[in-house]
Image (cartoon, rainbow, N blue to C red):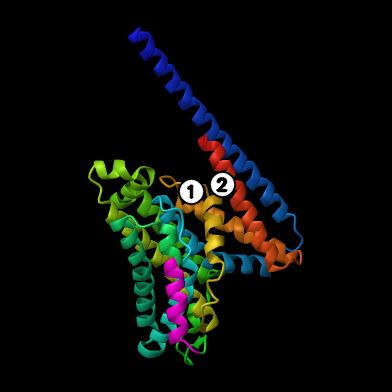
Amino acid sequence: MTQYSTAGTDVAVRAGARTRLDRARLFVWLQTIGIVILVAVILATPGFLSGPSILALLTTVSFIGCVAIGMTLITISGNIMSFALGATVGVTAMVFILAANWLGFGAGLLVGVIFGSLLTGLQGLLIGSVRANPIIISIAALALIYGVTQVFSEKGTIYADQGTVPALAKGKIAGVPIEFVVFLVSAVIAQFILSATRFGRNLFMVGSSFRAAEAVGVSTWRTITGAYLWAGFFTSLAGIMLAIRYDSANMDYGVAYDYDAIAAVLVGGTAIGGGSGSALRTFAGAMVIAAVQVMLLLKGLRQEWQYLAAGLIVLAVIVLQARGSGR
């Protein structure tokens, strides 16, 4: 009787595994078909392939894309997402301008990157060490960032002194905006971290199963803190690039970047529950989201329609992921 019972259990387990695999394959197919249709509609939009439109696309996607790269690491770690990265963009831009005005451009870059990394890294330390709810921590951080910034910045906008930002920093490399080159390099660095380092392997393990990672000796708090530190690093690049482009900074710079970044991460196929994802796929997802925004602008639709489109895309991907995982 025991042998029959064991055999039946094995058959059930194999059947369940096949079902999950079939659902995962279905999700990939549906996601691919959806993206192909979306790209076809985008390319068919009059004026989309013009020089100014492509240039605007490459510039716009760079800011959102760097935030999305950072969000990818947070999501893979099993902490879903952060609502404070958009605010981090704005406050890092302001810190960069202040530091550059006082200490010079190079020192400003270093201060801005360190500030953004530590600001987000501290959130990761809280989440990793005491297992605080990541959503609550990010909302609290969002409120604190805006509150403190309003106290210390009465005028709202901080401007760079004349000559502080070199013209070369706003130029192009082989006809491509410097911002896009930074985004591309960021995606490559993040993918290397995920694919070729021990930290990357630990990050996937923690995201897949926190308890299992602890059981095999992974320092979970360090891994989660590291994920947030890197997220802050990549996010700070977006704030610094915005400040360089406009010779100024304010807290409006990062508005809605969180949602666009989340959309890019999910469109790129990173699992909302953690443990699976790719920086290069997030790169592709960011390109899709930015292309949708440019398409809507070319069609004369207001920004509210961009938010609606991003929201619908995120909802569709979450539903497909849930179906693909069998939940």
Query: Magenta includes 269?
Result: no
Residue 240 is at least partly visible in this image: no
Q: Work out whether residue 195 or residue 277 is closer to the camera in this orientation and state it.
A: 277
**What main secondary structure does the magenta stretch of the protein show?**
helix
Q: Where in the figure is residue 8, as x and y percent of width and height? A: 42, 14
Q: Work out whether residue 276 or residue 86 is closer to the camera in this orientation and state it.
A: 86
- Give the structural element (helix, strand or loop) at label 2: helix
Q: Where in the figure is residue 55, as x and y percent of width and height? A: 62, 68
Label 1 sits on residue: 272
Q: Work out whether residue 319 or residue 104 is closer to the camera in this orientation and state it.
A: 319
Q: Which of marks 1 and 2 precedes in the sequence?
A: 1
> Vertical placement of 114 versus 138: above or below?
below
Q: Where in the figure is residue 191, as x and y percent of width and height? A: 41, 53
Amino acid on which the number 2 mark rests in the picture: Ile
Label 2 sits on residue: 318
Please report the bounds of the magenta region as a residue range: 140-154
- Give the structural element (helix, strand or loop) at label 1: loop
Image point 70% across, 50% down: which residue? 40
Q: Where in the figure is residue 252, as x and y percent of width and height? A: 55, 76
Amino acid on which the number 1 mark rests in the picture: Ile
Could you tell me which quadrant the N terminus lies in?
Answer: top left
Image point 62% across, 47% down: which residue? 316
Q: Work out whether residue 5 or residue 169 is closer to the camera in this orientation and state it.
A: 5
Image point 42% across, 80% down: which residue? 148
**Mark 2 and 1 residues: CB-CB less than 8 Å, in contact?**
yes
Image point 53% across, 79% down: which residue? 245
Mark seen at residue 169:
none
Circle 1 packing at 10 Å, graded few (<14), some (14-19), many (20+), is: many
Q: CA distance from mark 2 to mark 1?
A: 7 Å
Residue 23 is at least partly visible in this image: yes
The residue at the far bottom in this view is 162
Query: Magenta includes 141?
Result: yes
